[in-house]
Image (cartoon, rainbow, N blue to C red):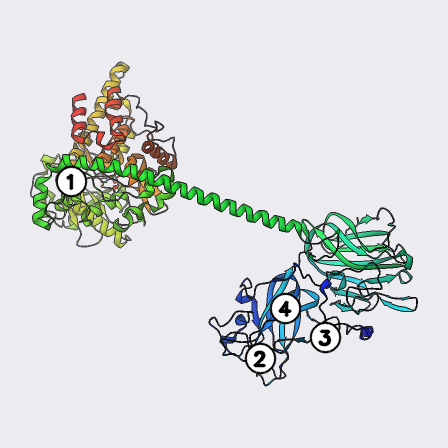
Amino acid sequence: CLKNPRMYFVYFTAAPLCLLVFSETCRYPLGMTGGQIQDEDISASSQWSESTAARFGRLDFDTGDGDGAWCPDIMSEPGGFKEYLQVDLRSLHFITLVGTQGRHADGMGNEFAQRYRIKYSRDGGSWMGWHDRMGNQVVEGNKNTYDVVLKDLEPPIVARFVRFMPVTDPSSIVCMRVELYGCEWLDGLVSYSIPDGHQMIYRGLDVFFNDSVYDGATAQRLTKGLGQLTDGAWGLDDFLHSHVPGAWPGYDYVGWSNKTFPKGYVEVVFDFDHIRNFTSMKVHCSNMFSRGVRLFRQATCFFRSESEWEPDPMTFRPSAEPLSQSGRFVTVPLGDRTASSIKCRFHFGDQWLLFSEVAFQSGKTIRALPFTTREDPTHKVDDSNTKILIGCLVAIIAILLTVIVIILWRQVWQKMLEKASRRWLDDELTARLAAQTQAFSFLRSSQSSEDGSGSGSISTYERIYPACADYQEPSRLIRKLPEFAECSGTSSRAGVGSDGAPHYAEADIISLQESSDSGSITAVNMNLFAGSDLTLREFPKEKLTFKEKLGEGQFGEVHLCEAEDMQDFLGEDTSTEGSSESPLLVAVKMLREDANKNARNDFLKEIRIMSRLRDPNIVRLLAVCVDTDPLCMITEYMENGDLNQFLCSLRLKTLTGGEADQQEGSDEVRYSVKLLGMAVQVVSGMKYLSSLNFVHRDLATRNCLVGKNDTIKIADFGMSRNLYRGDYFRIQGRAVLPIRWMSWESILLGKFTMASDVWAFGVTLWEILTLCKEQPYSQLSDEQVIENTGEFFRNQGKQVYLPKPQCCPDRIYVNLMLSCWRRNAKERPSFQEIHAQLTETR
Ligand code: AMP
């Protein structure tokens, strides 16, 4: 209005201009009260104190942790008209209404803004002052501290940033809480540029077609602003009248006379927030041909995505000359062209061209112009968007419901499995307990004298890892395995290997030593390993002479050394053990220097365990060097290395003694006899361990060593790993499990027993009989191996067994190997039985 002195002649009522406001639908609170507007998007020029910072300026938001409103620092800006509370809506919005409130603070507040001004910006750079249609910039605000005063913005504004600027006496403190109402500006139109509108004299009456609310620059052309063409109101049929009570004739329309356009068209440029895909443009035009006003004859639109206008414009001519004089929307198809600017030339159809509104459809987006009082062909409610929104919500709800149903279903199923499995485990445990009671009575008595635990039950089953419900369902295992350690307690009790991942066998050793409450088997082993009669002594390191490196394991390198005076040191004649040399050749396993504390502890624990084992088929620990770093354990030297490598390097010929002319059948017999002889030695060692109720947990050829005359001894109580990394399944960097050797219940229930060692022996036997030429289940991935374990659990006949090795006698495969992999652990043979069976067979 200030731009145009003609407006001073116009009388406006103070009544709300209902038709000009999106009163029905575009009056949503934009999030000051509801919190959708974030604290960081509310700022201010100053604040009276931290407790009256901008973020407290939310309408209807009382004290919270602040003092109940935003209050500027009156001292900061003498004059008091420059302070502002700024809201960043993050995107362009069509704002139709604002609300303000003072500081009530539960009756403590006494400040409010009686008047204020509004500034807004679309880009945060250039700011426009809002004014009403009369040109008034100052808005009447609050009269008390608590009532909300709403103010319709007429005209509405399109903005991203809005500032509320209290107009106040500099000496008084003023506080505000605010809310903005409107809807998102989906058109994306940020400005249009037009020639300023003309004046018509109609029967002596001045009719003004200027853009009276344009908020951009007004030189020869109006540029960089929005105005009446986007104010959401379109003109009446008779342009002399207006929606706006008391407005001057022609108020609703922006119009031009053809006299000043020699080329016969008016050029309008539209600029958008970003490149869009335009479907159509709708232009509301007057068609009062009786007064020389008609729809445009032709519209030619150019498109620009970058700096240049594209050469091929879209041209559109309205089909038939409408007979009616009523104003109407004309839809100009834009052919799905992409652009960030559109320049349209509207050719005069008569002497005058009058537009009241322009809207764009880009992609599926139509600008929301929700109000209407009559049938409106361009009803601009963003119908498609609403549908998409509703569609998305329905989809999300459907997905959520599905997920909930699945979760519930799985829980029910899990519980059923858990019950079944518990019942089965209990049966098994009871039976085992009964069977073992007698065998361990002597241990019980010695145990009771030591720790006072009295008649604690003794079980073959080492329930170190409580069965966890999550493991009742094999199909979830891969997902649940990372929780394996946590669920079963492994991580808390297991040492962490030198590479940071606990080895499951380490966990076993540690649990043997540390768990005093996890069942009698642990107590038995405690009794065995934690006694005070350790016979191991410190061997002088200087008496060790390095010969060669034998290998490298989890703790560090293993060296072949000469040990001077070892026989004297041991005080025994080692020739009975098959080593009569002097100095004695020994294997020295050294803890690597950079080993962490956990690895060091694990190393010492292994020493303690090994020091108690003495059997022809268990590698013997001779001495230790633990007084100085590096820590060393000295074991008997096994000339032929580990069984895996040993077998790998063997050929059938060697096994059969190289008699090439022998019959194939007899070759096979010799071959299997020799290999079975090796297996017997492994079983013999395991029989010894089982007699002590010691669960090895990592029986495999890689953990057996081969000495002179093909003597085989079980070693490495869970420590050899590097060379055989592929044999272990790493659980997210935490635990490594030899899953291909593990029984289903070890994997799924975390249960390790003699019976699970028997399962591992079955696999070890298979390795021996296949000469370790391939990894067990080599055709299956780790995940598939675990899935197969699930099949063992489900027992629907879908489980896959290791195949019969080529030279394995049928009876060994059927009667022995397969029996080691029986689902029911009770039905698997004991090591005594296996030993008897194998010796018989040989
Ligand atoms: P470990 O640290 O026990 O896993 O051993 C690593 C490697 O060193 C093994 O795979 C063997 O090849 C070798 N090794 C370990 N102990 C002995 C031993 N007593 N006699 C011969 N070689 C051994």
Instruction: Identify the element where label 4 is drawn.
Output: strand
Q: Quadrant of the N terminus?
A: bottom right
- Residue with the mark numbered 3: 136
Q: Amino acid at mark 1?
A: Arg
x then y, percent, for residue 236: 80, 60
- Tell me if label 1 and label 2 are in contact, CB under 8 Å: no
Mark closer to the chain start, 4 or 3: 4
Label 2 vs label 3: CA separation?
21 Å
Image mark count: 4
Are dots 2 and 3 in contact, CB under 8 Å? no
Find numbered disc 3 in the image and state the secondary structure of the residue it sits on.
loop
Looking at this view, is 660 or 313 the one in front?
Answer: 313
Residue 110: image quadrant is: bottom right
How far, Cα to Cα, is label 4 from label 2? 18 Å
Q: Which residue is mark 2?
A: 174
Q: Amino acid at mark 2?
A: Val
Give the residue pinned by disc 1.
620
Q: Which residue is mark 4?
A: 98
Task: Count residues near mark 4 (Cα–Cα under 10 Å), then give few for <14, some for 14-19, many for 20+.
Answer: many
